[in-house]
Image: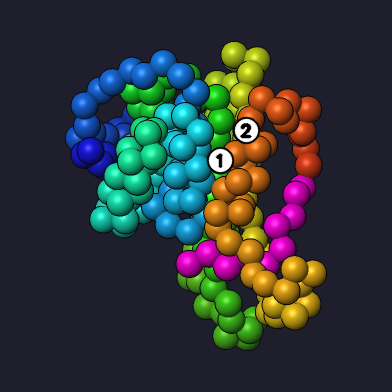
Amino acid sequence: MPLRCLTSQGGGPGQRETAVSQAIYRPGRVALVSDGSRGIGAATVRRLAADGWDVGFSYHGDGPSAREVEKDACELGGYAIGTDVDVTDAGEVSSWFRLAEEELGPVQAMVSCAGITREQPLARLAEADWRAVIDTSLDGVFHLCRTAVFAMMARRSGRIVTVSSVCGADLAETIELRRFGTAAEVADLVASLLSADAPDVTGRVLEVPTVIAP
């Protein structure tokens, strides 16, 4: 399954896009997942594909891993297509959302998994590292949610799940289950929030303690 690559110039009328994929329309449940080529994002893509969702996911500069996730989704009986998107760029996020709706149909769920960390003491944290964390983990989530919410408001339907982490040094001995959580367990929670069994869960913060997701 060919991957797509989006680029933008100026973030406005001069925005340029390239797409290398076969345009298709597959009626059904459609979800977008950011950072879907690794860790929690990849686990979420696989779980939603196994549940019958058509999934568009973003990655950034990790094409080989994205192809593996697409292959896994196909083997699970689902469908997923990866797109190289810089979530810190509002224009690229908007283009990705529009192309996904053209190819897959109306997006019914947005799952934001994109986030980075630069664990350093304050005195050693470089300005560039701080800016990268804020641009991805805050601005990126804002771009994803804002793009999705306008389309969902127009249809009066849709769900948004944002996945974030708290950096820390918790030890397994401090966890009730005495073990670390997994990316698959977070994906299971996301899938349950997007299921028909959870229509009234809104504005909630749900915690999955101490997940280690490379």
Front in this rendered view, residue 58 or 153 = 58
When the figure is inspected, residue 29 is found, relative to residue 131, above or below; the finding is: above
Look at label 1 and name its amino acid.
Val
Q: How many marks?
A: 2
| Tags 1 and 2 touching, CB below 8 Å | yes
Task: Report the amino acid beneath label 2.
Answer: Leu
Q: Give the dominant element type of the magenta stretch: helix, strand or loop.
A: loop
* Residue 111 badge: 1
Q: Which residue is mark 2?
A: 194
Residue 182, image x and y in percent?
58, 61
Disc 1 packing (10 Å; few <14; some 14–19; many ≥20): many
Q: Which residues are magenta?
A: 205-214
Looking at the image, which residue is at 45% across and 44% down?
Answer: 46
Determine whether the residue tagged by mark 2 lies in a helix, strand or loop.
loop
| Image quarter (top left, top right, bottom left or bottom right) of the N terminus | top left
In the shown orientation, is residue 209 left or right of residue 103? Answer: right
Residue 72 is situated, as x and y percent measured from the top left of the image, at 35, 46
Q: Is residue 176 magenta?
A: no
What residue is at 75 percent from the left and 68 percent from the top? 177
Q: How is the image coloured?
A: rainbow
Q: Residue at x 47, y 30 (%)?
A: 53
Residue 209 part of the magenta segment? yes
Can I make out residue 77 in this image? yes
